[in-house]
Amino acid sequence: MQNHPAAEILRGVRAGAPVAVGYVPMAMAFGVLATQVDRAGHPLLSFLQAGAMSLFVYAGASQFASLGMLAAGASAVSIVLATFVLNFRHFLMSVALSRRLPLRQGGHPVYHVLPLALGFGITDETFVVASLEERLGIRYFVGLILTVYLAWFTGTLIGAGFSSLIPPVIARGMGVALYAMFIAILIPGVKKALVNGLVAVAGGVLAWGASVLLPAIPGGWRIVIAILAASAIGAVAGGDEARVDEDRAGGPAGPDGSRRESRPRGTA
Amino acid sequence: MIWFMVAGMCLVTFVPRVIPLALGRNLVLPRWIRRWLSFFPYAALGSLIFPGILTVVEGRPWIGLAAGSCAALLALKARNAIFPVLAAIAVAVLLQLIVR
C-alpha cells in the first residue's frame, strides 16, 4: 500500500488532465462535424446520436472515420467493419496493459466486471500515459480513464450543441490538439532514452511509407503494422525502457534485474 | 440504421479492448514478446503523429507541421502537456488566418 486510495485516484486524474485538454477540442470537432448540415441540409448525426457515439463507441479515429464514410454514403456494415480494423490496435494495447495492471482473478463479482470497465477506458492516449507510469495501480488507472472519458463525452456534447457557433477556422485549428498532445507525451520519453525517440520516428516513417506504398490497406491496419515493426526495431536495437517495464511484470525484481536483459530467451 | 451502426461500432471497439484484460495474468508471455510490447507506446505515438499531423488543415500540411514543432519545442521545457497543446491550437488557428 503506497498511498491513500483517494490520493491514488487523484494522481490518475492529474495524469489524465493534459489528455483531457487535448480531447475536449477533438471531441468538440467531432460534435461539430457530426451535426453540421451537409449541402442537402441534413446533419450526419443528431445531437443524441453524436453523444451516444462518444459514450458507447468511444474511439476517436473511428468516430471521425464513420462521419467520413456516412458522408460518402457507406453502409452501416462497412462502417462497423472499418471500425473494427481501425481499433484492433487496442487489442495489442490491452495485452500490454494486462501485464501491468494488478487485476485479481475470480472471487468477488467485482473482479469479473472490473476488467470490462477498465478495458473500455483504453485509448491510444490512456494506454500511453498508463504504460509510462511507473506506479501503475487500479485506482490510478480509474482516475485516468474516467477523466479522459468524461472529457471526450462532454466535448462531444458541447461541439454538437453549439456547432453553428464555432467557426470552421477554429474547429480545424483544434484538430491539431490531438497531435500536439501526442508530441507532448512523447518528448519526455525521448529525453529519458533516445531509443524511444528512434522507435517513434520509425513508427512515423513506417506509417507514412505504408500510406504511400500500400494505400489499399485501411489506416488502422497500417498503424498496427507500423507499431509492430517499429517496436521490433526498438527491441532489437536495445535500450533501457524495456527493462523498466519487464521488472515490474512478475514479482519483485532483484537489484540485478538488468542482467537478465542481456540474454533474450527467444530467437528472433 | 444509425443506431444499428452505433451498436455495432460499440461491440467491435469493446471486445478487443477488453479480452486481454479479462484474461489478465493468465496470459503468460515469453520475455522477448514482453520486451517487444514495452516499445508499443512509442511506436504508437510515432505512427499516430505522422503522417496524420499533415492532414490537420486540408491541402496545407505545413500548418500541422508548424503547430506540431511548436508543441515539441514547448514540451522540451514544459512539465505539463496542457501548455504545448493550447499553444499548438493557437498556432494552427493563427496560421490559417494570417496565411491565405
Image (cartoon, rainbow, N blue to C red):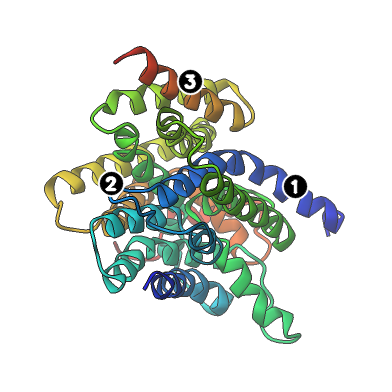
Q: Position of residue A59 (x, y in %)?
A: 46, 58
Q: How many numbered markers are drawn?
A: 3
Q: Is residue A77 above or below residue A184?
A: below
Q: Residue at x 33, y 37 (%)?
A: A201
Q: Position of residue A87 (x, y in %)?
A: 39, 62
Give the chain of mark 1.
A
- Left/right placement of residue B32 relative to residue A191 reads left
SS of the residue under disc 3:
helix
Q: Are marks 3 and 1 on the same chain?
A: no
- Left/right placement of residue B32 relative to residue A214 reads right
Disc 2 vs disc 1: which is toward the camera?
A: 2
Q: Position of residue A89 (x, y in %)?
A: 39, 61
In front: A237, or A219? Answer: A219
SS of the residue under disc 1:
helix
For mark 1, what is the residue?
A11
Label 2 – label 3 distance at C-alpha: 41 Å
In front: A59, or A242? Answer: A59
Label 3 – label 1 distance at C-alpha: 26 Å
Q: Is residue A139 above or below residue A112?
A: above
Q: Amino acid at mark 2?
A: Arg
Give the chain of mark 2.
A
Label 2 – label 1 distance at C-alpha: 46 Å
Q: Residue at x 19, y 58 (%)?
A: A217
Q: Residues within 10 Å of mark 1 (few under 14, many from 20)?
A: some
For mark 3, what is the residue?
B73
Q: Is residue B67 above or below residue A38?
A: above
SS of the residue under disc 2:
loop
Q: Amino acid at mark 1?
A: Arg
Disc 2 vs disc 3: which is toward the camera?
A: 2
Numbered mark located on residue A39 in the image: 2
